[in-house]
Image: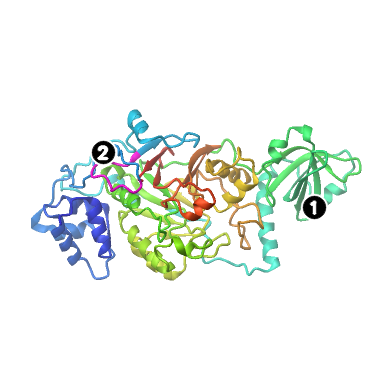
């Protein structure tokens, strides 16, 4: 059967154990006989090769020749908007995925008809793709221009043994680093020093929240702890701080300013401060037009993994429209995992965890081979549940080495051509949403829960709840440096917006609703790929389901 589309070429190569550079796929699609060209390229590939390169395809095609770069590849893909929004429908013969614009997350993704009515801007605009010597990589896609650095990766650096002293070190490090941010805003005194101050004095304390509760009179009592002891602060209901108290979580670091009672036994709060992100934060930007796809929660191995949507996504990555997408940042849950929730085995298509990663690896081969990929684990992946989560062990890394993907810890900071992206899978979002008022954090608007984590400068502030925390000498969960982009997943909901110039993105998932999700009333946003312009930090969401 002839190979009439980029997608079929990619899938056929993946079936044979290869992925390919996007230019190699274009050359194969442009060949007079794509099937024969593919056979020759595979035959001529070195025995230890994992990818097919453009040079190998040129050598394989030889005298058969290839079409000029101005000749459209027989990919079956044009630039018109897709009108298919049904997850189970066959991939459209023509049409690119739906593109949506906007931010803030308050406007849900518009319907296909609405998007068609208002039109969709080309992410990268038209660029000259003509070449004197036939098709070749665009100068803008030159790997030599790429810059990617990973920070805060604790893989291979775990020091905790679970002893009490380990937890003390973790929380001491948390306090020291976050209190340093707050000391520039208040005239801090240690708890033991405040206790010795005369009644009626003005005082300010920075501490971790040890307790917060309501009094019979409707006031709030907040107990703070620092390295010298604890001290209580009373927030009066008539002070106008109720909105702030509503946002307090246990174990987070806050500052309280106020006046001591006559007996110096309590601090009457006048103001509360979070470490927070400065309103004046200035973002970085790439010095060329280049894009990153922000995705998460693929869940290969689940009965509800949306393979067709994934194929549409990877097919699109091979089209000229996606030429600027040179990075994929995947925020965890590559596979469905085993034993993650009750009766999960009844919803598994693949029951062995290693077989799940083998299958995910095959799907990863469909991505253009010259795309940079960074992945962090999630709670469904085969790593420890306690955060921070190290990257995968060597056995799983060997399975995933088909694409030279970087696998780093959860969380991690990735600097992509001058744009700092904080990647965190997002388990603590469940805690934030459960503890805070709905208008402050909800599953329908997950980016608002992310705002709270930015405000607290910590991705998992509350200890002892659903979010497991591993003790380390350093608290890797502190948001030490302000990111330009905060990328999470986990909750399977699409939402994005800006908080003090930081773009917060929760990228949805690639898994349709499972029976378990129905039982807990989760209606997932599946088959979406947020595409981020790294030069402008503008974002477009594309729908593939």
Residue at x-position 47% and y-position 52% = 414
**Residue 180 pos. (x, y %):** 67, 48
Query: Is residue 28 or residue 354 the one in the foreground?
Result: 354
Left-right relation of 233 to 42? right
Chain-order first, disc 2 or disc 1:
2
Residue under pointer 1: 230
Mark 2: few, some, or many residues within 10 Å (few <14, many ≥20)?
A: few
**Residue 53 pos. (x, y %):** 24, 58
Query: Is residue 183 or residue 274 the one in the foreground?
Result: 274
Residue at x-position 72% and y-position 36% = 242
Query: Is residue 511 or residue 344 the one in the foreground?
Result: 344
**Residue 77 pos. (x, y %):** 24, 44
Residue under pointer 2: 79
- SS label for mark 2: loop
Left-right relation of 209 to 417? right
- SS label for mark 1: strand
Picture layout, residue 482 above or below residue 382: above
Q: Report how far apart the C-alphas of labels 2 and 1 lie in the structure.
A: 63 Å
Left-right relation of 410 to 240? left
* Range covered by the magenta-colored residues: 87-98
């Amino acid at each position: 059967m002839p190979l009439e589309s980029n997608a079929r070429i990619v899938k056929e190569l993946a079936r044979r154990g290869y992925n390919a550079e996007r230019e190699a796929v274009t050359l194969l699609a442009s060949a007079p006989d794509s099937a024969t060209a593919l056979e020759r390229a595979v035959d001529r590939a070195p025995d230890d090769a994992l990818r097919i390169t453009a040079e190998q395809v040129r050598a394989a095609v030889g005298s058969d020749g290839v079409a000029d770069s101005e000749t459209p590849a027989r990919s079956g893909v044009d630039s018109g908007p897709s009108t298919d929004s049904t997850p189970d429908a066959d991939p459209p013969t023509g049409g690119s995925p739906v593109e949506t614009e906007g931010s803030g997350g308050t406007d849900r993704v518009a319907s296909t008809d609405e998007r068609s009515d208002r039109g969709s801007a080309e992410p990268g605009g038209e660029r000259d793709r003509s070449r004197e010597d036939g098709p070749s990589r665009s100068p803008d896609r030159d790997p030599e221009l790429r810059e990617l650095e990973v920070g805060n990766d604790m893989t291979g650096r775990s020091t905790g043994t679970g002893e009490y002293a380990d937890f003390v070190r973790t929380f001491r490090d948390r306090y020291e680093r976050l209190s340093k941010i707050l000391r520039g805003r208040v005239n801090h005194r240690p708890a033991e020093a405040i206790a010795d101050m005369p009644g009626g004095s003005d005082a300010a304390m920075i501490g971790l929240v040890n307790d917060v509760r309501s009094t019979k009179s409707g006031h709030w009592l907040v107990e703070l702890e620092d390295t010298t002891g604890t001290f209580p602060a009373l927030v009066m209901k008539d002070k106008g701080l109720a909105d702030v108290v509503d946002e307090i979580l246990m174990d987070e670091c806050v500052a309280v300013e106020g006046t001591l009672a006559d007996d110096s036994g309590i601090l009457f709060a006048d103001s509360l401060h979070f470490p927070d992100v400065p309103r004046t934060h200035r973002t970085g930007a790439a010095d060329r037009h280049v894009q990153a796809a922000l995705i998460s929660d693929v869940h290969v191995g689940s009965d509800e993994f949306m393979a067709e949507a994934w194929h549409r996504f990877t097919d699109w990555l091979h089209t000229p429209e996606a030429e600027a997408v040179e990075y994929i940042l995947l925020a965890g849950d590559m596979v469905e995992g085993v034993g993650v929730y009750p009766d999960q085995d009844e919803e598994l298509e693949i029951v062995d965890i290693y077989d799940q990663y083998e299958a995910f690896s095959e799907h990863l081969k469909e991505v253009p081979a010259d795309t940079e990929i960074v992945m962090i684990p999630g709670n469904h992946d085969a790593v420890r549940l306690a955060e921070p989560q190290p990257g995968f062990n060597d056995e799983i890394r060997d399975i995933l080495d088909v694409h030279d993907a970087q696998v780093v810890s959860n969380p991690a900071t990735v600097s992509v051509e001058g744009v700092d992206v904080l990647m965190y899978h997002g388990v603590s979002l469940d805690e934030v949403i459960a503890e805070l008022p709905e208008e402050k954090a909800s599953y329908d608007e997950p980016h608002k829960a992310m705002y709270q984590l930015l405000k607290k400068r910590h991705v998992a502030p509350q200890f002892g709840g659903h979010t497991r925390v591993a003790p380390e000498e350093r608290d890797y969960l502190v948001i030490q440096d302000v990111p330009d982009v905060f990328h999470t997943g986990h909750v399977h909901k699409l939402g994005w917006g800006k908080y003090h110039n930081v773009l917060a993105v929760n990228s949805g998932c690639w898994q349709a609703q499972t029976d378990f999700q129905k039982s807990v009333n989760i209606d997932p946003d599946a088959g979406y790929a947020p595409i981020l312009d790294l030069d402008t930090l503008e974002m477009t969401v594309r729908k593939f389901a």
